[in-house]
Image (tube, rainbow, N blue to C red):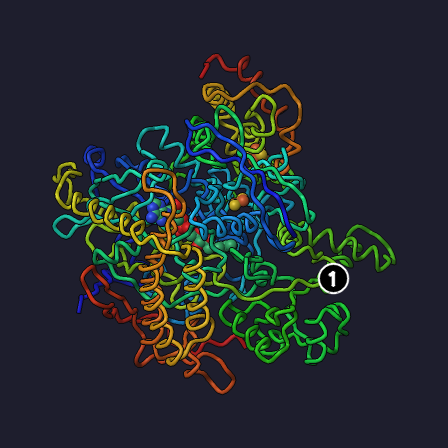
């Protein structure tokens, strides 16, 4: 067993971070200039880290497989970012954000990390405003907020439906400034294919130059990964097409541990699948649940008529609609957390009440909101006895101002007008709470290897609350790693520049080259894409919204067979020495195949239901998740080093000194 | 629906490119890129090289996708990126021409893929607010009038796709540059460095080999985020006044 030390500092929860920060080892400015740091990934986490480390004076080398740092998947985040500012005077506080996050995560995250996240959340907003992020504002010129699922305060800052874009552009510009200043060297279109360790410490990476195919060796005193999540193991997800697990997974093959890999977030409001050719799924931001009401027809025959396109949602009278979230969870209604909302949608569709031709969709209806806003606008603007048409017109204008770009996106994809007809939505894979195991310093069990943002497992437990990933990515990058990296680097000030001609680099470069040669040598008959699709279907079927032991055992076997088939029949066109997206995909899918198996093992091992992990064997009579705190209040960290036959489990017990473990209730 | 595609194929930056014809069977619910996925699956199944094109988010926000479709960057629909274009806007039997962005400052890498790092270098030259992490005051310390903030936001929605350059007969990058200059100039936080920024960014734009702006307005018409020409007017104003008002030249 590896002894997983969380390295949480002593002291009262609320004082840990402040005290620790002021007693930490520092690296003097003259020494910083002699220390090199590799940052892989330039999403919110990576770009924020690279920019800030550059500002501090370290020599940073930043890597992304994208053609520009501005393209990272973070750009697609829509809804918003949380911060415990309490600008609305509605009772928010650091403690409340901490508590909501712990509870939302179904008590499977580390208290001290989450509290620190809540503390620094406020600095993030200040920083972003200073960078010129155009957050939404009220008429008085102050910052606006909205509510997100799983909480009862309004603490989400947003920039229309493009919050991720604006935050990433802020971080990208901060990074650009450091590139200009010469503190950061940027490597675009470089994909990390391996981690290099010397004497047990992470000292560099091997990359493939995606334009030329050249295998390159890059050395540094330490390595920071901000390489994002692995939702694309499901093939269909809301993640960008090129998001992948390779950087994290290759680190696992070099000894890092993968924590809670089965904790996947299935987001309740996505545009349903329309056909076999589908390449990705599109999220409709959770913020829509502020105003949209979720329902299915009460009568099965109505649902069937809608499925057969004989009826429309608007044909169903009010009394025949089942607003099942409001019915089942009166306290939170449509704003229950994501895992709860997704499962509830699945239950209704499984009962046959779904509303699309496939039966896999529920309505998200803005009809009531449009009328409510229309009436209030009519009053505000002094329109007396407004006609129904006028009310609709005014209401639609308000809804457009709030969600215009989302409605437009919906219409472009489906060809339906969501102002007139209720939207159809269905859950889809969206985010991965699992990730590389890290301690309080965000350092993995491999000394000198750090993981930030969605790539680590640390803050969201078994379910992430909306608007908390952007917060975590930026917290890690701007306000945590710049301090905690010093704990490692202060011991390295006498270490000379790491030599990339060390045999460890040569060995790793050779093994990358060998993996690439192997992909071409197979020269089989099936495309990489077709394998990825099949893997995704297995994952969704057996490790998706509901899981059970029988299915998971079957799934593991199926993945192993698929992997064997992959290595005997995949076809990769072209050669290594050129721009070759098929080769890029082939290497990524190879890693997904291994990760998928570990996810299933993790789901099988965790004999309880918590957050996004729902084991059918463990549920209450009302169908709610049934946790087993006595046996599973731990982080499951999986080791699968090169040479090891199969993955093995290590545990970090979670200790809750400040919150009482309760059954999560949103009723 | 059955379609004929005339696609630009080019092995690498130095190779001679040419149009290649392909037949593809598509569904009206597919996105344009899903239609190309179908073509590529077909090519791979015949052990041929698939067509290289770039994409990532497939929801119109990352700015990666970039195809000239029937002569128009991002295709026929107003305010729509290539990835958001759906096949329901085409008819059975159509012939569709697909080309890369064409501009000296965006050299072709392969097939439909081009190098847009010139945009990154323009941002690096001054497209930011010079504030270090940790230096910020409270987010609500400076109120910003809602409409002004909204206008800054409109400019900030540029996705850096480069369609404006591809659309422009002179391959000018003015719309892109002016969007960033406007975004930051319209906010009190960015205003401070406005004069320096506009000069540095314009200098870098010229150094990258983009053409001159002659006000044809083609960029605005094809910009998927509907970035307005008024931004170019603002840039020109700021540039001129910066040349007179600051003794320092950047
Ligand atoms: C559609 C959508 C909407 C969302 N909306 C919200 C929201 O409203 N609020 C919220 O809080 N969260 C939201 N999220 C979640 C959030 O956007 C992500 O969790 C977060 O942005 C991840 O940031 P990151 O920096 O960790 O990784 P990413 O942004 O994914 O960046 C990963 C980076 O790593 C690089 N990289 C990866 N592997 C390699 C490699 N091998 N070599 C080189 N480079 C590599 C990539 O090029 C990229 O630069 C949303 C997610 C989706 C999918
Ligand atoms: S201005 Fe418009 S066309 Fe030009 S890069 Fe920005 S979004 Fe693309
Ligand atoms: S693929 Fe991201 S904008 Fe088209």
Q: Nearer the viewer, residue A69 or B135?
A: A69
Q: Chain of mark 1?
A: A
Q: Nearer the viewer, residue A144 or B209?
A: B209
With respect to residue A175, does A662 lie above or below?
below
Quadrant showing the C terminus of chain A: bottom right
Who is closer to the viewer here, B248 or A4? A4
Identify the residue under disc 1.
A372
Q: Residue furthest front?
A: B46
The answer to whether A181 appears left or right of A611 in the picture is: left
Task: Find residue A495 and report its horizontal and vertical position in percent.
Answer: 13, 40
| A161 relative to B235, above or below | below
Q: Residue at x 48, y 20 (%)?
A: B209
Q: Quadrant of the N terminus of chain A?
A: bottom left
From the Cβ of disc 1, is ligand 1 less than 8 Å away? no
Give the class, few, some or many, for how many residues have Cα within 10 Å of label 1's Cα (few <14, many ≥20).
some
Horizontal and vertical percent position of residue A91: 51, 62
- Would residue A415 be visible to someone looking at this image? yes
Residue A506, position in %: x, y?
16, 43
Question: Which residue is found at the position 52% from the left and 41% from the top?
Answer: B65
Per the image, label 1 sits on a secondary structure element best described as helix
Residue at 19% in and 53% down: A447
When the figure is inspected, residue A594 is found, relative to residue B132, above or below; the finding is below
Looking at the rendered structure, the number of numbered marks drawn on it comes to 1
Of all residues, the one furthest to the bottom in this rendering is: A621
Q: Is residue A580 above or below residue A332?
A: above
Q: Is residue A478 visible?
A: no
Q: Position of residue B59 (x, y in %)?
A: 55, 49
Dividing the picture into quadrants, the one containing residue A28 is: top left
């Amino acid at each position: 067993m590896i002894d997983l030390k969380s390295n949480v500092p002593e002291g009262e929860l609320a004082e840990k971070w402040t005290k620790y920060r002021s007693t930490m080892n520092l690296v003097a400015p003259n020494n910083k200039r002699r220390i090199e740091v590799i940052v892989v990934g330039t999403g919110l986490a990576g770009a924020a880290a690279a920019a800030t480390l550059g500002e501090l004076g370290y020599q940073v080398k930043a890597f992304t497989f994208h053609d520009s740092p501005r393209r990272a998947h973070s750009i697609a985040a829509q809804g918003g970012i949380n911060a415990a500012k309490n600008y609305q005077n509605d009772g928010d506080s650091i403690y409340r954000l901490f508590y909501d996050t712990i509870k939302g995560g179904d008590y499977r995250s580390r208290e001290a990390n989450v509290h620190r996240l809540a503390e620094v959340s406020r600095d993030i907003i200040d920083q972003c405003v200073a960078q010129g992020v155009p957050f939404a504002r009220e008429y008085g010129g102050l910052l606006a907020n909205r509510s997100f699922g799983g909480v009862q305060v309004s603490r989400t800052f947003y920039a229309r439906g493009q919050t991720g874009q604006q935050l990433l552009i802020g971080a990208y510009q901060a990074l650009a400034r450091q590139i200009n200043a010469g503190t950061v060297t940027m490597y675009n279109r470089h994909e990390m294919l391996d981690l290099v360790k010397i004497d047990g410490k992470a000292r560099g990476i091997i990359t493939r130059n995606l334009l030329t195919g050249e295998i390159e060796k890059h050395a540094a005193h330490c390595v920071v990964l901000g390489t994002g999540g692995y939702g694309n193991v499901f093939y269909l997800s809301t993640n960008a097409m090129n998001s992948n697990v390779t950087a994290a997974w290759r680190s696992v093959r070099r000894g890092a541990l993968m924590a809670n890999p089965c904790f996947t977030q299935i987001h309740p409001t996505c545009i349903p699948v329309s056909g076999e050719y589908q390449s990705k799924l599109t999220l409709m931001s959770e913020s829509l649940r502020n105003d949209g009401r979720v329902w299915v027809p009460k009568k099965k025959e109505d649902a069937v008529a809608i499925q057969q396109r004989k009826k429309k949602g608007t044909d169903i009278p009010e009394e025949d609609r089942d607003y099942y979230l409001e019915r089942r969870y009166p306290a939170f209604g449509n704003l229950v957390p994501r895992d709860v909302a997704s499962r509830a949608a699945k239950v209704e569709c499984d009962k046959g009440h779904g509303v699309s031709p496939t039966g896999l969709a529920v309505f998200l209806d803005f009809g009531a909101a449009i009328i409510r806003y229309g009436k209030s606008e009519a009053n505000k603007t002094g329109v007396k006895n407004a006609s129904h048409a006028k009310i609709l017109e005014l209401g639609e204008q308000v809804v457009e101002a709030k969600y215009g770009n989302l409605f437009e996106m919906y219409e472009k994809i489906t060809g339906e007008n969501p102002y007139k007809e209720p939207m159809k939505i269905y859950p889809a894979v969206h985010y991965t709470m699992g990730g590389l195991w890290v301690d309080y310093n965000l350092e993995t069990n491999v000394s000198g290897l750090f993981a930030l943002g969605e790539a680590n497992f640390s803050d969201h437990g078994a379910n992430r609350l909306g608007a908390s990933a952007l917060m975590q990515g930026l917290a890690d990058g701007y306000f945590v790693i710049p301090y905690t990296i010093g704990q490692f680097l202060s011991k390295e000030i006498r270490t000379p520049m790491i030599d990339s001609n060390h045999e460890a680099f040569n060995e790793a470069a050779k093994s990358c080259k060998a993996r690439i040669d192997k992909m071409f040598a197979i020269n089989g008959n099936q495309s990489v894409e077709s394998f990825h699709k099949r893997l995704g279907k297995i994952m969704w079927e057996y490790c998706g919204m509901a899981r059970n032991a029988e299915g998971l055992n079957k799934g593991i076997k199926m993945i192993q067979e698929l992997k064997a088939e992959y290595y005997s029949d995949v076809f990769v066109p072209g050669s290594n020495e050129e721009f070759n997206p098929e080769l890029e995909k082939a290497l990524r899918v190879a890693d997904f195949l291994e990760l998928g198996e570990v996810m299933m093992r993790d789901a099988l091992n965790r004999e309880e239901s918590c957050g996004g992990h729902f084991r059918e064997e463990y549920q209450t009579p009302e169908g709610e998740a049934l946790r087993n705190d006595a046996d599973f209040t731990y982080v499951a960290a999986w080791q699968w080093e090169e040479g090891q036959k199969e993955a093995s489990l290590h545990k970090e017990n979670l200790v809750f000194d400040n919150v009482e473990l309760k059954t999560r209730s949103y009723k | 629906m059955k379609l004929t595609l005339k696609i630009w194929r080019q092995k690498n930056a130095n190779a001679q490119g040419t149009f290649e014809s392909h037949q593809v069977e598509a569904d009206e619910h597919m996105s344009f890129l899903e239609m190309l996925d179908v073509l590529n699956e077909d090519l791979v199944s015949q052990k041929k090289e698939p067509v290289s094109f770039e994409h990532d988010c497939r929801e119109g926000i990352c700015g990666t996708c970039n195809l000239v479709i029937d002569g128009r960057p991002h295709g026929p629909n107003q305010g729509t990126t290539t990835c958001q274009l759906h096949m329901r806007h085409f008819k059975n039997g159509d012939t569709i021409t697909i080309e890369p962005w064409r501009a000296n400052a965006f050299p072709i890498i392969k097939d439909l893929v081009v190098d847009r790092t010139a945009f990154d270098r323009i941002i690096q030259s001054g497209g930011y607010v010079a504030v270090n992490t940790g230096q910020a005051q409270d987010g609500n310390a400076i109120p910003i009038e809602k409409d002004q903030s909204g206008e800054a936001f409109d400019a900030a929605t540029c996705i850096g796709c480069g369609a404006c350059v591809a659309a422009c007969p002179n391959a000018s990058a003015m719309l892109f540059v002016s969007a960033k200059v406007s975004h930051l100039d319209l906010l009190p936080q960015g205003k401070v460095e406005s004069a320096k920024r506009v000069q540095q960014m314009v200098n870098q734009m010229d150094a990258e080999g983009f053409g001159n702006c002659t006000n044809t307005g083609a960029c605005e018409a094809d910009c998927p985020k509907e970035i307005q020409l008024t931004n170019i007017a603002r840039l020109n104003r700021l540039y001129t006044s910066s040349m007179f008002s600051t003794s320092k030249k950047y």
